[in-house]
Image: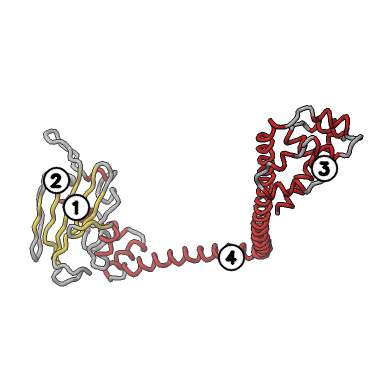
Amino acid sequence: MFLKSIEVQGFKSFANKMVFEFHKGITGIVGPNGSGKSNVADAVRWVLGEQSAKQLRGSKMEDVIFSGTESRKPLGFAYVAITLDNSDHQLAVEYDTVTVSRRVYRSGESEYKINGHNCRLKDVQELFFDTGIGKEGYSIIGQGQIDKILSGKPEERRELFDEAAGIAKYKKNRTVTEKSLEQERQNLERVTDILAELEKQVGPLEKQSAKAKEYLKLRDEEKDIDIHLFLYDYERLKKEQEENAEYYNLHCSLDELSEQAAAGFHHDFVYYFSANRENEDMERLYAKKNVFGWIDQIENSKLQEAIAQLPADKKLLLTLRYQYRKTQREVAQIMNIKQSSVCERENRILKEIKEFLK
C-alpha cells in the first residue's frame, strides 16, 4: 500500500485545485519558507479526520479554508482527497484503489466520503486503524512532533507505540465495550429498582383488578336487566296502546251513532225524565219515549248487542253522554248523582262493553 495522489482545493494556501502525484519510492517536496510545504502534511492529517485546529496550526477549523488575498476573494470551502494503492488489501476493503475525501464549509458543515460514498468520521478512523496512517499514526510526523514525543507524558508515548504495534484498534474497542458494559450495568440497576417498585404495587393492583372484574360483572348484569326492563316496558306500552286504541274506536263509534240519530229524538226528554222518573217504571218510560231507539240503528251487531244487554241506568248514561251530548255535570244533575260518579260509571260501562266485545 502506498500513497498515489493528493488533491487539494481551497485548503489553506492552495486556492486553486492542485494534484500531487506520487510513485513508489521516496518523494520530496522542497521550496522556500512560506511556500506551503507544511500545508501538504496538514492536508493529509486533516483528511484523515483531525478535529483539532491547533494541530493544524490554526485557532479554529474555519482557518483551514483559503482566506483570500489582495487580488483573490476568499473561498467558501476547503477540499482534500487522498488516493491510496490498496492492491495488497492492507485496508479492509475490497477495492484496489481507495480515495478518502473531506470537505468543510464556512457554515461549519462537513462531509466525508470513501470512494465517492458518504460516510462518517468514525468510518474513516476505523479504516486506518492499525495501519499507522491515522491522524495519530507514526507515518505523519509534523514540525516539532519529535520534541513533543520525547518530552510528552508516558501515556502519550504509549499511544504512539500502540499504533505502531497494531493494538490501538483493540484498545479503542475495549474502551467502547467497557463504556457499553457500564451503561448496561446502570440500566440493569434501574430495571432492578423499577422491578422492586412494581412488586410493591402488585398487592394493591390485585385488589383493584378484583374490583374491576366485579364492576365489569355487575355492569353486564345491569345491562341485561336494562334490556329486560326495556322489553317489559315495550310490551306494557304496546298493550296499553292497543287498549287505548280500542277505547278510542268505541268512542268514535258512539260519537258517529249520536251524529246519525240526533235529529230524530225529542230534545225535551231530559226535563220529562227528571219530572217522571219516580212515578213510572223506567223501562216503560224509556220505551214510551223511544229513548234507546238509537241502539237499534247501530250497524255493528256486536256493539249493538253489547249495549242492549246493559241495565237501563247504564244505557241511560250512555244515551245522555253520546246521544244528547250532555256534559258529565249535566248528566249528574239529571241522574241526581255526583259528577265524579258519572266519570267512574262511564269508564266501567265502556270497560264492560269492551270485555263483551272480546
Q: Residue at x 33, y 58 (%)?
A: 152
Q: Earlier in the sequence, mark 2 or mark 4?
A: 2
Q: Which residue is mark 3?
A: 312
Q: Earlier in the sequence, mark 2 or mark 3?
A: 2
The dot on residue 43 is 1
Instruction: Assign a secondary structure to mark 2.
Output: loop
Q: Position of residue 131 (x, y in %)?
A: 23, 67
Q: Which residue is mark 2?
A: 14
Q: Is residue 43 above or below residue 154?
A: above
Badge nearest the viewer, 2 or 3 = 3
Q: Amino acid at mark 4?
A: Leu
Q: Earlier in the sequence, mark 1 or mark 4?
A: 1
Residue 204 visible: no
Q: Residue at x 76, y 28 (%)?
A: 267
Q: Which residue is mark 4?
A: 195
Badge nearest the viewer, 3 or 1 = 3
Q: Earlier in the sequence, mark 1 or mark 2?
A: 2
Question: Marks 1 and 2: CB-CB under 8 Å?
Answer: yes
Badge nearest the viewer, 3 or 4 = 3
Mark 3 to mark 4 CA distance (whole Å): 93 Å
Question: Marks 3 and 4: CB-CB under 8 Å?
Answer: no
Instruction: Assign a secondary structure to mark 1.
Output: helix
Report which quarter residue 268 is drawn in: top right
Q: Position of residue 352 (x, y in %)?
A: 77, 49
Mark 2 to mark 3 CA distance (whole Å): 134 Å
Instruction: Assign a secondary structure to mark 3.
Output: helix
Is 176 left, or right, of 350 in this rendering? left
